[in-house]
Image (spheres, grey):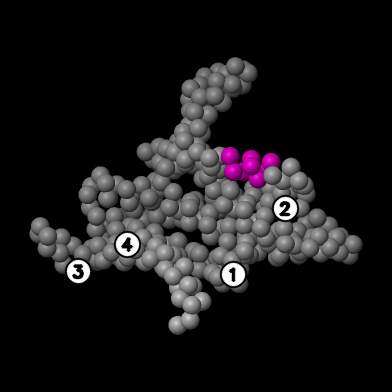
């Protein structure tokens, strides 16, 4: 083995160790825990009981489906909101304006997700800023409670995920030659036609990579649905937390974790298939 290959493997070693010790092994261990049933103290046997409980309990199944649908919807909304922003940053804004736009997207992430979520709670609660303004302006006769509903949860999810959609879109759109858009207009295309036939197809790698990241973050989010949705938020990560922490039922919690991992992997695979992208292409689109 020559010096260059040795240097390459040594540089790659920290990444491989991180993936193996912090991702692969914990997931395999979680799978093993989910496939066992406690017979007595320290004695376990193979069992699919915890997966059976998921499919036979309507609360678990409905929460699972609801989380998937809400996550897909949040990803779609994030894309619709982020695309014009990314286009403005990549193709319209120049110099300081471009930097200011990037900074505006980045500022909310200077604090933790918990602080950002509490900020929304201060704005939207019954005694919050917006409710007080509505009463002051005469638009409401009594305090208005805007927390603990699906719209609020969706707002929080889109807000916390937007940066992860904007960055890959900007990276992709910056590489597009402006002459392609100009030629499309010269050939008689309108705004919608140019967007559909030129801009969106070119931006597909950025769209796919952004959607993958946003969907995974949204599906696995715990703080935002729990705090903004309240006790009736019905988010699947809350079910996992309940099994692990509240009920100390690690086997059931591990089964839920495996199911959530399978769901995220399946939807990402379907997205890549529908967009005719490979995982490697999606992850290297902003390189």
Name the residue nearer the viewer: 175 or 234. Answer: 175
Decide: is 126 above or below 29: above
Q: Quadrant of residue 261?
A: bottom left
| Upstream in sequence: badge 3 or badge 2 | 3
Tell me whether circle 2 and circle 4 mark residues in contact (CB < 8 Å). Answer: no
Q: Is residue 259 visible?
A: no
Q: Residue at x 62, y 64 (%)?
A: 287
Q: Is residue 208 magenta?
A: no
From which residue to which does the magenta span run? 100-107
Tell me whether circle 2 and circle 1 mark residues in contact (CB < 8 Å). Answer: no
Residue 196 at x, y percent in the picture: 74, 61
> Which image quarter is the N terminus in?
bottom left
- Return the residue at label 4: 26
| Upstream in sequence: badge 2 or badge 4 | 4
Q: Secondary structure at mark 1?
A: helix
Decide: is 16 above or below 140: below
Foreground: disc 3 or disc 4: 4
- Return the residue at label 1: 281
- Return the residue at label 2: 90
- Return the residue at label 3: 46
Q: Tell me if 198 is positioned left or right of 5 in this view.
A: right
Which residue is at the far left? 40
Q: Residue at x 59, y 69 (%)?
A: 281
């Amino acid at each position: 083995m020559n010096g260059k290959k040795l240097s390459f493997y040594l540089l790659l070693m920290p990444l491989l160790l991180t993936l193996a010790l912090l991702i692969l092994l914990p997931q395999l261990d979680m799978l093993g825990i989910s496939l066992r049933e406690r017979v007595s103290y320290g004695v376990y046997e193979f069992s699919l009981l915890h997966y059976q409980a998921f499919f036979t309990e309507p609360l678990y199944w409905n929460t699972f489906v609801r989380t998937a649908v809400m996550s897909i919807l949040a990803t779609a909304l994030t894309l619709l909101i982020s695309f014009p922003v990314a286009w403005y940053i990549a193709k319209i804004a120049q110099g300081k304006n471009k930097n200011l736009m990037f900074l505006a997207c980045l500022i909310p992430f200077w604090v933790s997700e918990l602080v950002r979520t509490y900020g929304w709670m201060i704005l939207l609660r019954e005694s919050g800023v917006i409710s007080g303004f509505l009463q002051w302006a005469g638009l409401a006769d009594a305090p208005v409670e805007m927390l603990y509903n699906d719209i609020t949860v969706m707002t929080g999810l889109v807000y916390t995920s937007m940066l992860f959609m904007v960055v890959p879109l900007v990276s992709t759109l910056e590489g597009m030659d402006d002459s392609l858009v100009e030629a499309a207009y010269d050939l008689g295309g309108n705004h919608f036609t140019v967007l559909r036939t030129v801009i969106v197809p070119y931006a597909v790698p950025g769209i796919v990579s952004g959607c993958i990241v946003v969907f995974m973050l949204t599906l696995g989010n715990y703080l935002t649905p729990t705090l903004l949705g309240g006790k009736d938020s019905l988010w699947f990560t809350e079910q996992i937390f309940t099994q692990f922490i509240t009920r100390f039922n690690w086997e059931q919690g591990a089964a839920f974790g495996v199911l959530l991992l399978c769901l995220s992997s399946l939807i990402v695979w379907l997205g890549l298939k529908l967009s005719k992208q490979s995982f490697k292409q999606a992850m290297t689109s902003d390189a």
